Amino acid sequence: MMQYKRILLKLSGESLMGAQGHGIDSGRLNDYAEQITDLVKNGVQVAIVIGGGNIFRGLSGAAAGFDRYKGDQMGMLATVINSLALASALDGMGTRARVMTAIRMEPVGELYAQPKAIDALNNGEVVIVSGGTGNPYFTTDTASALRGIELKADVMLKGTRVDGVYTADPEKDPSATKFDTITFDEIYNKGLKVMDLTATTMCKENNLPVMVFNMDEKGNLLKVMSGDNIGTLVK
Ligand code: UDP
């Protein structure tokens, strides 16, 4: 039994690099597409926002001397590249996927509009909403919060490389323990890094719960949707 009917899945661009350390790893890409296909087969409506960190980040670009505004636009275009790659992998498996873009660039993708996206979701298509929010100085976490709220998703599933929210960074502090559930207020008060604060605040103010889980382990997406206690629910 699936816990949620309509989800906003946030995928990290950085994870798409897989072990190769740059670009798009086709093994990782196909693994994601398979996990998403499993949900579609179970009748789940899936909207996706994918990051661009494997290709370009505006902030690191600015540190290297790029103009921040243009660098952020480069980052947003990077998310479009990743979105096309994921749509291609899904299509290859017979899972219908549609790329929408926050910035007009037909025929690469159709311009995002909430009613169109909801229609496609109701038709059983995977909708990949690319190009972030279309604005610099935002992140794809904020784009996920925004699209999740607009598309009336039941939850934002934030696929990461760690299996949830910990008391401290588990890669630095071996005594760190994982929360099964945590509130948005605790995230602020304890200064935990789950998402940027803009995204966190949007989710809190609009009652969009966020499930943080390890997407890089095969089958985890279906497990989370089946109610297995493998991530952290923020609400
Ligand atoms: N970005 C932006 N506006 C948005 C979303 C993303 O300017 O609404 C840019 C920003 O430069 C960011 C890059 O796109 O660094 C890639 O997105 P993000 O860092 O969130 O990707 P991830 O870390 O999840 O791979």
Image (tube, helix red, strand yellow):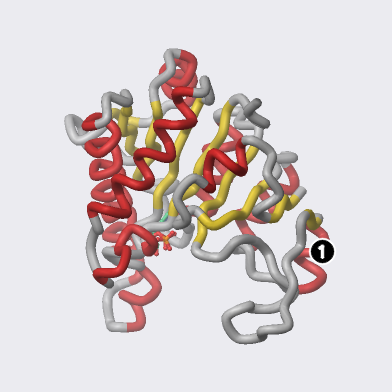
Callout 1: SS: helix
Q: Is residue 229 above or below residue 60?
A: above
Q: Is residue 123 left or right of residue 19?
A: right
Which residue shows up at 65% across the image and 26% down it?
Answer: 1
- 106 on left or right of 73: left
Side (left or right) of 146 relative to 207: left
Decide which of 92, 62 is in the foreground and name it.
92
Which amino acid, by three-letter code, is at mark 1?
Answer: Glu
| Residue at 24% across, 58% down | 24
Q: Position of residue 107 (x, y in %)?
A: 17, 30
Estimate the x, y position of residue 28 in percent, counting from the top left. 32, 54
Residue in the picture at 63% in, 28% down: 2
Q: Quadrant of ligand 1?
A: bottom left
Q: Which residue is mark 1?
A: 186
On screen, residue 165 versus residue 48, left or right, reads: right
Q: Position of residue 112 (x, y in %)?
A: 38, 31
**Front position in the image: 88 or 61:** 88
